[in-house]
Image (cartoon, rainbow, N blue to C red):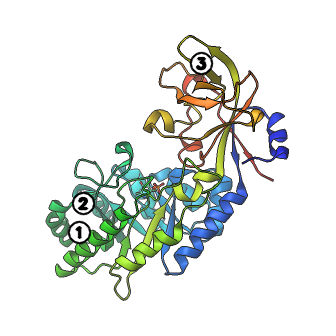
Amino acid sequence: MFNQDTITRFQSTETPFYYYNLDVLRQTLQACHDASSKYGFHVHYALKANFNPKVLEMVKSFGFGADCVSGGEVKAAMDFNFGHDKVVFAGVGKADKEINLALDNDIFCFNVESVQELEIINELAQAKSKIANVAIRINPNVDANTHAHITTGLDENKFGVNMWQLDDVVAALKACAHIKFTGIHFHIGSQITDMEVYKVLCGRINEIQDWFEQRGFPVTVLNAGGGLGVDYYNPDTNTITDFETYFKIFADNLNVKPGQEVHFELGRALVAQSASLISRVLYVKNGHKKNFLVLDAGMTELMRPMLYQAYHEIENLTRQGEVNDLKYDIVGPICESTDCFRKDVDFPTSLRGDLIAIRTAGAYGEVMASGYNLRDRVQSVYSV
Ligand SMILES: *Cc1c(COP(=O)(O)O)cnc(C)c1O
């Protein structure tokens, strides 16, 4: 929802740009903070969802840690003072220089995704006479009931160590003198809205932590990952994800033992609703079979629809309140047929110059912008 002052401001701003509503961001972070601190849970923000500097500053101000998936993100987490002891580092392909950077910064924990990676971290830590804290990322074979392109916790996915490899993990842990086993980590997918999935995950975590303890490896960190979804269909009426219900599921179903810490890694749910991509209609092409609105934004600014067949609400801000009397395919300017935000959208009759908002674009939006077609880098504008 944009008030008239905001739309007037958009009219005098060059498009396309990401518009950040900092009030929505603040309220979302507050809600997550309140719901998680009730149980003493630790939340790490997944930087890959959005590393816009203003977003990072605000996330950090709520005391959240950082969840990183590259050396660049570890560096950003350090630069933005998230605190080295609040940085976790996951990723199926950590390069040696990235591991070294994380060792140099004494991060809280590596989330290790294979036996071979464990051995390499051990070697690199030994060379620096350090001990690396690790949690084992386990693929629990739990179906996240989300889009196949953003499911990560099934046997056929590349992430984590499979359950049948855990004996090898234990053998490797015994052999690695420069590794300290701290616990177990899970991340089964993204845009998860079916809360039953998290109950199943809790059951699996309980079994696996017992398995490690029976083998002489006490688990101090239970890291449940992220993946909590948002409502892409109702950004104005369901703006803030139900963090209360989410954390309560873990509080009720996880078997948390004395001295254990419970960690989460949330990305999307914290930032998605705080931004929209604002664009203008460049051309209207009415045909026999299709009507097209060609925007000045495309997959170079927001790639989710093209990459994951993701749905975004799209609004014509210039014609708010007018009847939807036509159907359009809303497309970008890029020389690719997949450069389409949505097909057959019910829309008011639109004209060149109309302002278009693509909603719920704060997560995996600006961060995936590319320079393909030698396009200008998309700008950011903030609410005042
Ligand atoms: C991407 C990612 C997250 C965050 O996922 P969301 O769906 O944005 O909450 C958390 N943990 C890991 C390891 C990730 O790769």
The disc at residue 176 is: 1
Estimate the x, y position of residue 136 in percent, counting from the top left: 29, 65
Mark before the other along the chain sequence, 3 or 2:
2
Estimate the x, y position of residue 267 in percent, counting from the top left: 51, 57
Estimate the x, y position of residue 245 in percent, counting from the top left: 48, 70
Q: Nearer the viewer, residue 309 or 98?
A: 309
Task: Tell me if 193 is positioned left or right of 218 in this view.
Answer: right
Mark before the other along the chain sequence, 1 or 3:
1
Q: Nearer the viewer, residue 273 or 195?
A: 195
Please name the amino acid that badge 1 sits on.
Cys
At numbered mark 3, what does the secondary structure look like: helix, strand or loop?
Answer: strand
Q: Which residue is mark 3?
A: 291
Q: Nearer the viewer, residue 271 or 128?
A: 271
Q: Which residue is mark 2?
A: 119
Please name the amino acid that badge 3 sits on.
Asn
Compared to 346, does 230 lie above or below? below
> Which of the 4 quarters of the picture holds residue 293?
top right
Mark before the other along the chain sequence, 1 or 2:
2
Task: Tell me if 213 is positioned left or right of 111 in this view.
Answer: left
- Kindly check if marks 1 and 3 are in contact, taking CB atoms under 8 A apart as contact: no
